[in-house]
Amino acid sequence: MSAGDGRKPSIVFVGFMGAGKSTALHAARAEGLPTVEIDQLMEESFGSTIPQAFERHGEEGFRAREAELVGSLLEEADDGGAIALGGGSVLSPRIRAALARHTVVWLEVDAAEAWRRIAHSDRPLASSAEDVTELLDVRLPLYEELADAVVPMGDRQIVRRALPMLRRLPELPAGTKLLWASAPGGEYPVLVGRGLLGCGWWPLESRRFLISDRTVAPLYGDRVEPLGGRAEIEAGETAKTLSNVETVLRELTRAGATRGDHVVALGGGVVGDLGGLAAHLYQRGVPVVQVPTTLVAQVDSAYGGKVGVDLPEGKNYAGAFQQPAAVIADTELLASLSPGELAAGFVEVLKTGLLAGGSLWERVRAIETIDPAGLDDVVFACARYKCQVVAADELDTGLRNVLNLGHTVGHAIESATGYTAYRHGEAVGLGLLAALRLSDAPALRAEVEAILARHGLPTRLEVPIEVESVMESLGRDKKRTAAGVGFVLLNDPGAPRIGQLVDPAEVEASVRELIA
């Protein structure tokens, strides 16, 4: 997307058959935007239905005329309207090039849902579920590459609700990407880009009350002004306590925050979790805008609405679910992180790559140097994966458990060492090695160990620690059931298995293997 040539960009909806592009145009039309549906233009051009055009001219003939008609339209469009492309329009290099100056909105749909929606229609290239799967596999990388914004599957009104944010996207810094996150508990924009803080845009109009820590607030607090008040805590995991929640709540009270205002959680995972919980509790709930400043927060913890604090007995033992009102991930802020903090945050990227598999895993495993200037696409991809999981299981009763890969042993290590010996990501990296041993995946474990070592992350427990302490902490894991602690195991990237009960002796052996 680029509006630098002075012309007014259009909103261009792309996506597979059945994704809802026509419905999206109805929403745009209802907002007073001029609209164009490419399928209608193609039928007018051929003087026949699209299936008839395919039959008479073949796919090659159809695509040639589509490239000419749609390419010209996109090159000349200057009315700020909305255009819905055909599902295969993105196959044309000319069309892809012409999309660069517009706001490209990818309406996501998976193969199963697409087939459910089009099974009884006359589609020339998709007469079976197998056809749909094969076609979608070919087109997915193109949709992903072109998208400035991603809107997931949802009800027929989801684009209408996202449209105000989609229309504002060209006003934001060049390269900004938008994900419209959707879960039963709420929908919200996720923005990933450079220079988002201080650019003059803000998602809510009510007064802002800052919650941050004493390291981050002096660096970036002025970028989220004007503020109605602020509350600061000490930096680090040891500050993630109920007593600090009370301190923050009382600061909000003294500053005069009301239910009509909102909280800004500016910081890493600790501030995001504690600030989100404070927002959830204050006057029975006020909105929270998450502004993650660390890599681990930008790729994972800022999304999904899990907020909470630690107890001496265990990590994240007191908490709630509250979806944010927005997430603003300004990747420019990552440049201020130390190499150690960046590497620790990269473990969550590594975890997400293992869970997602496919192209994301290939991208993650190939990263030789963690360069904060080149992480935007990875941050956005990880946010998309996390939000997809949350949409399917917001309250963590099933699928969302996959996100615990590496965290079961990792949290136990953090707890057993008093949250002072290892950064969260470092402990999770060790937990990944334990999980892959328990998965009986020696080759994958060896590769993950090599990746951790390449980025200067620990692959052994290098501080004095008793295995019994780790096992005791692990036995208090908050996800345990009467049957025991269920692990997330994984033999191949992209194929996690949740709720796996493991012989305690094997778990203990996996921890002993980590001792230097």
Image (tube, rainbow, N blue to C red):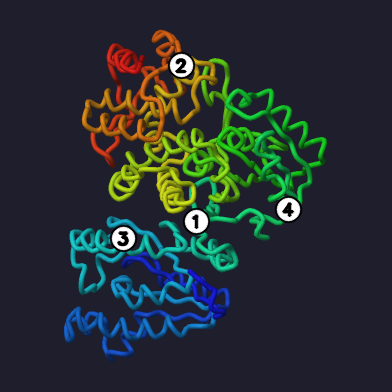
Side of 27 where 259 appears, left or right: right
Badge 1 density bin: few <14, some 14–19, many ≥20, Cα 10 Å:
many
Query: What amino acid is at disc 2?
Result: Arg
- Secondary structure under tag 1 reads strand
Q: Which residue is labeled 3 in the image?
A: 140
- Residue kind at label 3, given as amino acid type: Leu
Q: Report whether 279 appears left or right of 91.
A: right
Going from N to C along the chain, the mark reached first, 3 or 2, is 3
Q: Which residue is drawn at the image coordinates 29% and 29% (left, top)? A: 489
For residue 73, above or below residue 388? below
From the top left corner, tell me how far across and down residue 150 is, in percent.
44, 59
Going by the numbered disc 4, the residue's amino acid type is Ser
**Are the residues tagged 3 and 2 within 8 Å (C-beta)?**
no
Callout 2: SS: loop
Q: Residue at x 45, y 46 (%)?
A: 371
Mark seen at residue 180: 1
Amino acid at the residue labelled 1: Trp
Residue bearing the label numbered 2: 476
Q: Nearer the viewer, mark 3 or mark 2?
A: 3
**Tag 4: Cα neighbours inside 10 Å, few (<14), some, or many (≥20)?**
some
Q: Rounded to the nearest whole Å, what is the CA distance between mark 4 and mark 3?
A: 39 Å
Look at the numbered disc 3 and give the secondary structure of its residue. Answer: helix
Label 4 secondary element? loop
